[in-house]
Structures are given as C-alpha cells and as structure tokens.
Amino acid sequence: MFSKAIVRTPCPNLIAGISSANLGQPDYALALEQHQQYIKALEQCGLAVTVLPADNDFPDSCFVEDTALCTPNCAIITNPGAASRQGEVIDMARHIPNFYSAIETIEAPGTVEAGDIMMVGNHYYIGLSARTNQQGAEQMIAHLEKYGHSGSVVSLSEVLHLKTGLGYLENNKLLACGEFLTKPEFQQYTLLEVDPSESYAANSVWVNDTVLVPAGYPKTQQLIEDQGYKTLAVDVSEFRKVDGGLSCLSLRF
Ligand code: CIR
C-alpha cells in the first residue's frame, strides 16, 4: 500500500514539452484543471499528496515520476536521458530528504528516467530505452540491491518508457500491450491484453486497490473492472499531447 505522493504543478511552458504525439499543444488552463482532478483521485485512494510548485524552466517538470525512484527502503534520484529534463532532478533532490534518509543518485554517463521502472513486489524491471541506458540501469540495480531489492533489465523499442506499455496491477496481474505481450520475462504474470486501439491506457496505475485509468478508454476500463478492481477514470488528455500519462504525473510510495 502507498501512503504518500509527490506531484508538481504543470508550468505554462508545458506547451513546449517534448512530444511525438501529433495531437497539438496542450491547453494549459485545462491541464491545470486536470492536474487538480488527478490530485483529488490520489487523495481519494488515501494518499497524502505533496504538491511542488510549477517550474517554468523545465517544460516537462510535471512528469515527476521520471526524476526519482521511491522504494520502501530508499530513494534514488535519476539522471534523465532527455537533455532538457536533466536539471529537473536538482529541485527534486531538495525535496526527497523530507521523506527519505537513504538516498542514492544515478551518475553520468548513466541515464535513467523512472518511467522506465516497474515495481513488482521487491523486484524492479528496468526498461532500456532512448532515455535509460545500460550504465544507468546497472547503477540502479546496484543501488536497489544495497537496500534489499532486486532489479533486471528489459529491452524495449516501440514506446517511450517501459510503463508507457505496461502497468502492474498487483495480484500477479499485468496490463500490457504491443511488444510486452510476448516478452518471456512477463509470461509468469496473468497478462491483461490492452486493445491496440487503446494502447495509451496500458499506462493505468494501481493505487491501494483502486486502478486509475485514463478517461476515454472504455475497453481497458472494463477489462480491469472484469478482474474485480475498482477503477477511477481521470482525464489526462492535455498531458497525452506531450507524451505523458497517469503514472508520470506522480511519485507514489
Ligand atoms: C518526455 O518526453 O519526457 C515528456 N514529454 C513525457 C514524459 C512522460 N513520462 C513518463 O512516461 N514517465
């Protein structure tokens, strides 16, 4: 179970966030409203949410998930692979000591964005992507092992981050689409196959027995409900325009 979350208010420069979506620029006012609803959803799931202020120097800074990995035993500040995002970790590193005493960092030439990391119990799958490299993953695994966790790498080629295409819903159930459906390391889980027309909804998030699902993906919402989960649909349409999803908008621990 999680008890806390950290989010960061989107900044006006969000409209200049890195994007491959081809969906136009986010509507900033609507993004702020959706962010408020997102915070409410986390609170409804029982989390105490710390809201960090907007930082207009970093267009993608509301996607806090990428800047740190928060485990039960330690926090690891990442080194994002996207050059425009590397400075985001400086401010995050100032806040993490409010929650953790055991803190590690990923150092160049290693890069990691924690959207590439999926927690399954005590084990952490680390996607090797355009943003997370082998050296970063190796540093991450060494840090995790120091604190009693384990980690392993997963290759990926079709999506931005590992959790763009995967969502672990606890109870051995794994929401997956595309390339992840056939990877040998995930065959031990009950795979819940996301329809390709709703691949964005693979980034749904388990939070204390409720699954947050992006609004507008009814097949995936039904698929998850059919497994006995309570769901909460949250509209993140403006974040999708800059390749962001539900998980990216918070650190949950
Ligand atoms: C980026 O490209 O870095 C942002 N526009 C989106 C980050 C999404 N984060 C995530 O999937 N964890």
Image (tube, rainbow, N blue to C red):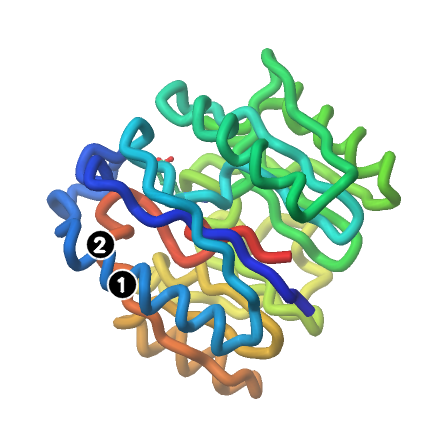
Name the residue rendered at 73%, 61% in the picture.
188
Q: Is residue 165 visible in this depiction of the protein?
A: no
Image spot of residue 64 (x, y percent): 46, 43
Please tell me whether residue 129 is drawn above or below residue 72 in the rendered image: above
- Amino acid at circle 2: Glu
Disc 2: CA contacts within 10 A as few (<14), some (14-19) or many (>=20)? many
Name the residue rendered at 51%, 29% in the picture.
89
Q: Which residue is mark 1?
A: 34
Seen in the image, is 104 located left or right of residue 150?
Answer: left
Image spot of residue 106 (x, y percent): 65, 24
- Amino acid at circle 1: Gln
Assess mark 2: CB under 8 A from ligand 1?
A: no
Seen in the image, is 208 located left or right of residue 74?
Answer: left
Q: Quadrant of the C terminus?
A: bottom right
Name the residue rendered at 56%, 66% in the picture.
48
Q: Secondary structure at mark 2?
A: helix
Disc with the residue nearer the chain's start (2 vs 1) = 1
Seen in the image, is 61 located left or right of residue 186?
Answer: left
Using the numbered discs, state the Cα–Cα distance from disc 2 to disc 1 in whole angstroms.
8 Å
Name the residue rendered at 55%, 83% in the picture.
229
Q: Secondary structure at mark 1?
A: helix
Determine whether label 2 and label 1 are within 8 Å by CB: yes
Q: Quadrant of residue 74?
A: top right
Image spot of residue 168 (x, y percent): 60, 62
Seen in the image, is 229 located left or right of residue 3?
Answer: left
Where in the image, quadrant-wise, is ligand 1 located?
Answer: top left
Q: Which residue is mark 2?
A: 238
Image spot of residue 127 (x, y percent): 58, 38
